[in-house]
Every structure is written in structure tokens, then in C-alpha cells.
Image (spheres, rainbow, N blue to C red):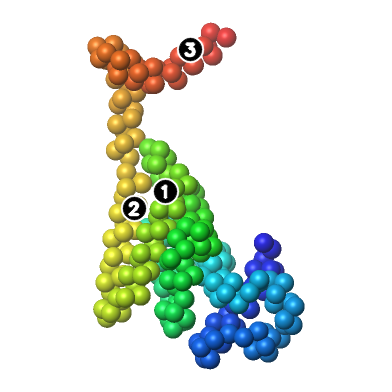
């Protein structure tokens, strides 16, 4: 989807949300008046009114991408800083349309699970944050697959629901929970302990030969951690 098409869809959606909040419903004639577009032009972007309202949520992520391009040094933020920035920014954006979000979030996002466009866009964002971070431990790569990013997004949706129901002053309970969750995730994927454990296992089973004293499992581990050494030797022989 081109940037021009995304911007046109966002413009239509914003007008539709305004109509929803002021009139309680959205009609194509009203949307034509609000946008200055023809009905044909509107339908060239969306198949129906439901699709227009549903696009509000992925549009938040598209706008966020544009926002962080304007933040100097964003690429140097830590993982928890990036995640917190995203979470708080979207809370602020959704707060501006609180009535709409209250009425539509479950229907257009939460109940759709991983099939919603919002879920897919957030998953893509989280994947970008994690795969572009040079501080991520090598061992974290073992579980950082597509299902991992999707799982993070699912937990984020629960956080949004927690935020929606949070009646504490300034949503302080949600903010505290968000800080703890982002810090925990960062600590988990930045932790180099598993990297060191892997290096130790490689040394013990690959170089020292401890695996010879452990039937079957020891042989398997020896093969695993000796493989790279054997490849290097073969290369040198050539």
C-alpha cells in the first residue's frame, strides 16, 4: 500500500470516527460531505462502512511509524524505551477518541485476535524493534520467531483492555504495569547468561570431550558442539 493511499484512508477514517462520536453512526452521504470525496472514491478505498471504522486501529500504527521518523536518535533507544514510547503514545491517541474506542475495540480488534489488521501491524512493529536491537542476546534468537512477536501483541491487547478499565488517577496502575512489563522483557532478551552457558557447553562438550563419558546424550551434545570445529578443520585442510 502506497503512502498516498494510506494517507487517504486515514483521512476518511478520521472523518468517520468524528461522525460516529457526534452522531452515533456513520452514513456515506455524511462522509461524502465531511471528506469532500465522492461515494465512488470512498468505496475505492474501503469495501463498506465497517472496514472504514475498523481501519482506525491500524491507522494508529501507521501514524506512529511516521512519528518516530521525526524523533532524533530513536534508533538508539533501548528496547524498553521504544516499547514504552509506543504504548504511551497509542494510549494518548486512543484517549482522544475514547468513546469510539470504548464502543469498537472489542469488535474490531480484541475479539478478532491475531486476524485483525491492527494485530498484524503491531506484530510487525514489535518485530522491527527486536530484530534491529544490537543488545539482544544471541540466545534470545532461539525463541524470537514469528509466533513470539504475535504472542507479544496478544499480551499488548490485554494491556489495552486493562487500560480501558483502569479507574486509577491518571491511569497510574496501567503506567506502572507497562513499565514493569517492558523492563521485564528487556531484561529477558538482553540477558547474556544463556550466551555464556552456551559457550561453556560448547567448550565442555566440544573441546574438553566430557560428552564421551555420558552415553547417547553426551554423544549428541558432542556432535552438536563439535560440528563447527570440524568444519573449520576441513576448511583448513583444503
- Image-based side of 9 in relation to 207, left or right: right
Residue found at the far top of this picture: 237
Q: Nearer the viewer, mark 3 or mark 2?
A: 2
Q: Quadrant of residue 51?
A: bottom right
Left or right? Give the position of 31 relative to 215.
Answer: right
Q: How many residues crowd mark 2 within 10 Å: few (<14), some (14–19), many (20+)? A: some
| Residue at x-position 28% and y-position 65% | 177
Q: CA distance from mark 1 to mark 2?
A: 12 Å
Q: Is residue 151 above or below residue 207?
A: below
Residue 60 visible to the viewer: no
First in sequence: mark 3 or mark 2? 2
Q: Nearer the viewer, mark 1 or mark 3?
A: 1
Mark 1 / mark 3, whichever is N-terminal: 1
Q: Residue furthest bottom?
A: 23
At which x and y percent is residue 18?
Answer: 55, 86
**Residue bearing the label numbered 2:** 185
Where residue 61 sits in the image (x, y, percent)? 52, 66
Q: Residues within 10 Å of mark 3 (few under 14, many from 20)?
A: few
Task: Measuring from the top left, give residue 102's x and y in whole percent.
Answer: 41, 79
Give the residue number, with chain letter if any, for mark 1. Answer: 148
Residue 162 higher or lower than 199, as above or below = below
Which residue is rendered at x = 60% and y = 77% of the image? 49
Q: Position of residue 52 (x, y in %)?
A: 60, 75
Residue drawn 65% across and 84% down? Answer: 28
The quarter of the rendered structure image containing the C terminus is: top right
The mark found on residue 233 in the picture is 3
Left or right relative to 184: residue 35 = right
Measured in 3D between alpha carbons, the distance from the residue under mark 1 to the one under mark 3, in whole angstroms, is 36 Å
Secondary structure beneath disc 2? Answer: helix
- Total tally of numbered discs in the picture: 3
Amino acid at each position: 500500500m502506497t503512502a498516498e493511499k494510506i494517507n487517504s484512508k486515514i483521512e476518511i477514517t478520521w472523518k468517520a470516527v468524528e461522525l460516529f462520536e457526534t452522531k452515533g453512526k456513520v452514513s456515506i452521504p455524511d462522509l461524502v460531505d465531511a471528506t469532500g470525496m465522492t461515494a465512488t472514491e470512498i468505496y475505492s478505498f474501503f469495501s463498506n462502512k465497517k472496514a472504514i471504522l475498523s481501519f482506525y486501529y491500524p491507522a494508529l500504527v501507521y501514524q506512529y511509524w511516521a512519528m518516530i521518523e521525526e524523533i532524533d536518535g530513536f534508533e538508539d533507544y533501548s528496547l524498553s524505551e521504544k516499547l514504552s514510547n509506543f504504548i504511551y503514545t497509542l494510549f494518548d491517541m486512543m484517549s482522544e477518541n475514547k468513546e469510539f474506542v470504548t464502543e469498537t475495540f472489542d469488535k474490531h480488534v480484541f475479539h478478532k485476535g491475531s486476524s485483525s489488521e491492527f494485530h498484524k501491524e503491531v506484530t510487525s512493529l514489535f518485530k522491527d524493534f527486536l530484530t534491529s536491537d544490537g543488545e539482544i542476546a544471541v540466545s534470545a534468537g532461539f525463541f524470537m520467531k514469528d509466533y513470539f512477536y504475535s504472542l507479544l501483541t496478544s499480551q499488548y491487547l490485554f494491556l489495552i483492555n486493562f487500560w480501558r478499565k483502569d479507574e486509577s488517577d491518571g491511569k497510574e496502575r496501567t503506567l506502572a504495569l507497562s513499565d514493569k512489563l517492558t523492563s521485564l522483557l528487556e531484561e529477558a532478551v538482553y540477558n547474556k547468561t544463556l550466551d555464556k552457558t552456551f559457550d561453556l557447553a560448547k567448550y565442555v562438550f566440544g573441546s574438553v570431550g566430557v560428552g564421551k563419558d555420558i552415553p547417547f546424550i553426551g554423544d549428541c551434545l558432542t556432535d552438536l558442539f563439535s560440528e563447527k570445529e570440524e568444519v573449520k578443520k576441513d576448511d583448513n585442510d583444503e
